[in-house]
Amino acid sequence: MPTPDAPPAGPVAAKERAAAAVAADGQVQGFLKYLRAERNASVHTLDAYRRDLVQCAELMGWPPAGAAAVPWGRLNLALGRQFVMLLQQKAGLSRVSVRRKVSSLRAFCRFLVREGALPGNPLAGLASAKAPRRLPQVLTRDQVAKLLDAPAAFWAADIRDRTGKRLDDALLALRRDAALLEAIYSGGLRISEAVGLDLKDVDLFSGVFTVRGKGKKQRICLLGKPALAALRAYLETRENLGLSGRRQPGALFLNLDGGRLTARSVQRQFKLYLRQAELPASCTPHKLRHSFATHLLDAGADLRSVQELLGHASLSTTQIYTHVSAERLLEAYGKAHPRAR
């Protein structure tokens, strides 16, 4: 079996050498440009691919001594298997992480084939261990209700005790975060989709809004009456504070300085609301999206409709929620039926 080239002295030196070589590699730059231009890949996705290619070069000891370029043309099935082994044994990665990194390298090889740099994808036959199937964790309807009420409860004392600008800030945070959580649950949004919303995306009369999801794909989402009421209250507060009017272009959810709210800020505030609602600290905003899908299926929504609302490209991705819904039914049956046990 081929072995990786001997890396330079020390793991830090090997990583720095690999990172520098990959950064200067024209084929890698072409691949990232292709992902950005033709696949609408996000900045985060591009960074992930770049890191995976750096790690491949590092573990393989590339570029070899005396060379400046990464010899991607040397990739073959045996080296691919060696890469998987090194990811598991040397890097200590989980099966899920290994699968993702192999997928990145396989996609890069497909690009090289397309560009004529490789005669065929040497990793096409490379099998990686199946990732364990994990069912998404969801909140009950009562837990969701507590979470959606948490911003008002959390800021109640501050609003009572504050004056002037500090009172305005508390009012804005309350109304904004209440509207944000309602929108995430009502539309089944990811955090990035919620903070990426612009005013022009939302129709407050019909309750329909446009979301830009992964790969910049657009989909239509819906706002229920509570979400619409929360959004109207937030926009009225925002306008009264002079941050921007409803007809002005720009971000829907603003921070206290008038800039677009960030995902990091949402995550930070979310932890406060979890404590207020007495929910597990391990809960994340993404669980509202999982709960959205599961609660729809529990209520009889068809799988295709849920797929469209979530923006899933494949129905198989949405089907995992049917397993969650079935487990919940079994649990309810086990607790309620007199002859279940």
Image (cartoon, grey):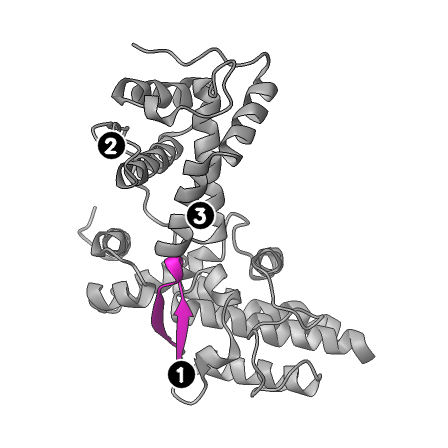
User: SS at mark 3?
Assistant: helix
Of residue 37 and residue 197, the one placed in the foreground of this image is: 37
**Up-down relation of residue 286 to residue 124 (above or below):** below
Identify which residue, 163 or 141, lies in the foreground.
Answer: 163
Residue located at (73% from left, 74% from top): 169
Mark 2 crowd level (few <14, some 14–19, many ≥20, 10 Å Cα): some
Q: Is residue 234 visible?
A: yes
Q: Nearer the viewer, mark 1 or mark 2?
A: 2
What span is in magenta?
A: 208-222
**x%, y% of residue 87?**
41, 23
Q: Is residue 211 above or below residue 115?
A: below
- Residue at the (44%, 34%) spot, across then down: 52
Q: Disc 1 marks which amino acid?
A: Gly
- Which is more N-terminal, label 3 or label 1? 3
Of 124 and 32, nearer the camera is 32
- The crowd level at tag 3 (other Cα within 10 Å; few <14, some 14-19, many 20+) is some
Image quarter of residue 115: top left
Residue 50 image point, x, y percent: 47, 38
Q: Quadrant of the N terminus?
A: top left
Q: Which mark is residue 207?
A: 1
**172 lies left or right of 99:** right
Residue 234 % position (x, y): 59, 80
- Residue to which mark 3 is pinned: 45
